């Protein structure tokens, strides 16, 4: 992208700040931001928001290292948390309403994992009950929690959230943003 995508702006706000504000507007608490590459450039984008920061020195290892860093921070914060919601900042449609739908689906289904479903697959954001924290903490590689989201369909509730299919990974993705969200 040429610069950290967390700092790309939509409606004058960096992607990361938008995602953090969405989480803060939901019942999710605490909110943990995991920083890896370019942490010092990115930190000012949310410096005044009430979040926990997890530094991920192993960021080059892949997405799993960020998940481990976030889960470790949550576990250190409180041993009583019943769930963790894992979200990415590069999905412009992510919102507090997204979180509410995932939480409602977990309550309705009783499933230990609830994932957004778009583009024919389960993905982030996803809600994991505490029973899955050890598995999240043991992940390795670039695929993150993908295996947990797909290995046993009976334990995963999927919530159709097609707007989340748009994520910003390349300049072409940014160019496809709807005009009302243009940078």
Image (cartoon, rainbow, N blue to C red):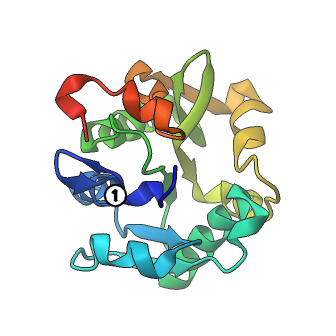
Q: Is 148 above or below relative to 129? A: above
Q: Residues within 10 Å of mark 1 (few under 14, many from 20)?
A: some
Q: Residue at x 59, y 71 (%)?
A: 37
Report the residue marked by disc 1: 28
Q: Is residue 57 visible?
A: yes
Q: Residue at x 41, y 37 (%)?
A: 102
Image position, residue 104 (x, y; %): 36, 35
Q: Foreground: 3 or 17?
A: 3
Q: Quadrant of residue 16?
A: bottom left
Q: Foreground: 141 or 129?
A: 141
Q: Residue at x 68, y 69 (%)?
A: 59
**Image side of residue 144 versus residue 8, left or right:** right
Q: Is residue 79 visible?
A: no
Count the marks: how many?
A: 1
Q: Is 166 above or below relative to 40? A: above
**Image side of residue 78 versus residue 178, left or right:** right
Image position, residue 14 (x, y; %): 29, 57
Which quadrant is home to the C terminus?
Answer: top left
Q: Residue furthest top?
A: 120
**Image side of residue 8 versus residue 22, left or right:** right
Q: Quadrant of residue 150?
A: top right
Image position, residue 105 (x, y; %): 43, 31
Element class at badge 1 = loop
**Image side of residue 129 versus residue 132, left or right:** left
């Amino acid at each position: 992208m040429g610069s950290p995508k967390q700092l790309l702006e939509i409606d004058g706000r960096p992607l990361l700040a938008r995602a953090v504000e969405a989480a803060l507007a939901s019942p999710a608490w605490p909110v943990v931001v995991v920083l890896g590459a370019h942490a010092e450039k990115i930190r000012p984008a949310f410096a005044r928001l009430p979040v926990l920061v997890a530094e991920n020195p192993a960021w080059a290892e892949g997405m799993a290292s960020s998940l481990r860093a976030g889960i470790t921070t949550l576990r250190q914060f409180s041993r009583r948390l019943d769930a963790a919601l894992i979200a990415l900042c590069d999905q412009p449609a992510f919102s507090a309403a997204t979180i509410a739908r995932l939480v409602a689906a977990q309550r309705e289904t009783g499933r230990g994992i609830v994932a957004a479903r778009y583009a024919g697959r389960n993905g982030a954001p996803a809600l994991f009950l505490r029973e899955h924290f050890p598995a999240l903490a043991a992940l390795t590689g670039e695929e993150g929690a993908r295996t947990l989201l797909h290995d046993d369909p009976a334990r995963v509730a999927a919530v159709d959230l097609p707007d989340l299919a748009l994520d910003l990974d390349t300049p072409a993705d940014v160019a496809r943003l709807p005009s009302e969200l243009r940078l």
